[in-house]
Image (spheres, helix red, strand yellow):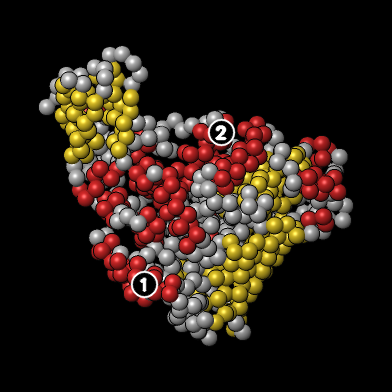
Amino acid sequence: MRYSKRIAFLFAIAFSTTSFSQSIYQSATVRSAFKKGTRTITGKPGVAYWQNSGDYNIHVNFNPATNLLSGEETIVYSNNSPDTLKRLIIRLFPDHYKKGVKRSDEIAEKDQNDGVSIEQLSVGNESITNFSNNKKAFHSNTNLIVIPKDMVLPHTKINLNVKWHYTVNTGSQVRTGMVDSGSYFIAYFFPRLAVYDDMNGWDDWNYNGLQEFYNDFGNFNVEIKVPFNDVVWATGERLGEEANLGPAIMQKLQQAKSSDKIIHVIDPADYATNAVINSDNTGIWRFKATGVSDFAFAVSDHYVWDASSVLVDSLTKRTTLVSAAYNTKHKDYFDVANQAHQSVYYMSHLYPKVAFPFPQITVFDGTDQMEYPMMVNDNPTETHKDAVQLTSHEIFHSYFPFYMGINETQYAWMDEGWATIGESVISPIMGEPEDEGIYSKTRYEHISGTDKDMPLITNTKLYEGAAYLSNSYGKGGLCYWVLQDMLGDKLYFKALHQYMSDWHGKHPIPYDFFYSFNNATGKDLNWFWRTWFFDWVYADLGITKAAQQNGMIKVTVTNKGGLPVPVYLTFSFDKGEPKTVHYGADVWKDGKTEFIVTQKFPNKITFVRLGNDLTPDKNGEDNVWDGSDKK
Ligand SMILES: [Zn+2]
């Protein structure tokens, strides 16, 4: 860091934007972060910003015959915080299947087990063997709390060694487990450190199967041992794969790395002729991933593999290998490699218009609809439309939460909202528009204005059901669309790119997003953040007055629900085509509730309709005017 004029300039901005920060609510936690200088009201990380990280070296052995997964890992954990860590929180995600653990979902009796058995744990030089001692190490639902002999001092690293095993679930799949006889999607399989951050210190949240994740970034070196005939797909880049895959498969894989057409890297004939696996295969598959927040892998002894490459960065000519691995029984999957290819292309060049951040991504025919860095676990779908929307949605998560380290457990709209709008923008280009406007406009309308329609800023952990779905997906996605509609494409992308580049690889909170947009657009958008995120308001506009005289029409639109959404008015005439006029949501700035539209047309107006296919509206009955004077 340099103390230059640029820093002085940033301070000047900070000063001039002080009025921004005063007009949205800041909790004591948020104020404290600004005071400490880890975050700033410019929306950029503060000079005192820090985050911890963990590097994982993992050897894992998975045996589908017994469903036993055993592993050994070294974690190098960096405490970059100014704090001394007196305890460590280790997440044992597979304990979601442990008898007696608190869960948001039902796990069948037969899939409940004893959870993770820790065979060995050392923290620094200390070996810990007793895990029910509340002064040393103890379980708290899916977390293992450890109080090491040596505290972890600020700006130091500590090594942890863990040896563990557990039984992978064959049913009751919650984002992980057996897919069919011979295929598995395995996630959350290794003990890992929870996040310690500048906002809340240790994140002691317990995984219950509902909320998603919040992880540190780190580097992963992983060796996965499986039976001879199994193929492995995983997060990261393959190392030494010529020792695993047969020569003919290797040749096709090389071809796929430079082909923009889909290559059938493994097809059914390759299984029939025993060409898939190299005769010298040791069953150990190696992967390396840098700067990622998670690692997942998948195994199959019969899946086919389609792949191609996408030019993601026209400037550097960087490409991404895009794959689909699937069961040929699932016909919808025949097009998934193509959908994934197009998704990665449009994300890189159209929305969010940021080069795809990873060297590869694999969509695996699985049991869920869930994203991982460079991996997707997607169930087969009934229709082509569902496949397109699901594929584009899950791949879009590569940006949020994986390019940006979002705390999904707390602010799900900061990743699901983006995946929702991303899916809504990209699916129509692939010929499959959303049926209900943005993702679930009608679903949002349904709960809009009820006590489930909570302010977006509400901590995701505090709600479930319709409130969880609506706030995380539909309302989040709508908010981003309304913002783009209001700012215009140029300013919107300028702000989005500023936010993404400032917080890439970091942990942004909602205020970093708000202030980043304020700063990049040069606009005080606090009125917008306040109503969309903090107020109890809902989407409901209505035409409350209208009259035409001598070719002039005056329409009064009233914002009855209080949520700032755009105004689209479509005028129909006694002759000629209808005409639509549009005003951004900023017509409701600073709490205005009435907006008068005056327009002049050459023909007689016979009908006026308020709203469009994307704008939510709780009550559509007051959105029309039939030509008679309305007072
Ligand atoms: Zn999602």
Q: Earlier in the sequence, mark 2 or mark 1?
A: 1
What is the C-alpha distance between the residues marked 2 and 1?
A: 46 Å
Q: Nearer the viewer, residue 227 or 263?
A: 263
Label 1 secondary element: helix
Callout 2 amino acid: Met
Q: Quadrant of residue 74?
A: bottom right
Name which residue lies at 50% across and 59% down: 501
Which residue in the structure is indicated by mark 2?
430
| Residue 436 visible at all | yes
Name which residue lies at 58% across and 79% down: 158
Q: Quadrant of residue 518?
A: bottom left
Counting from the top left corner in percent of width and height, residue 38 is at 41, 72
Counting from the top left corner in percent of width and height, residue 305 is at 72, 42
Callout 1 amino acid: Phe
Which residue in the structure is indicated by mark 1?
11
Front tag of 2 and 1:
1
Q: Where 499 falls versus 182 (above or below)?
A: below
- Along the horizontal axis of the image, is 534 left or right of 471? left
Q: Nearer the viewer, residue 55 or 479?
A: 479
Asked whether the beta carbons under mark 2 and mark 1 sit within 8 Å of each other, the answer is no
| Residue 360 visible at all | no
Counting from the top left corner in percent of width and height, residue 203 is at 44, 67
Name which residue lies at 46% across and 57% down: 498
Q: Quadrant of the C terminus?
A: top left
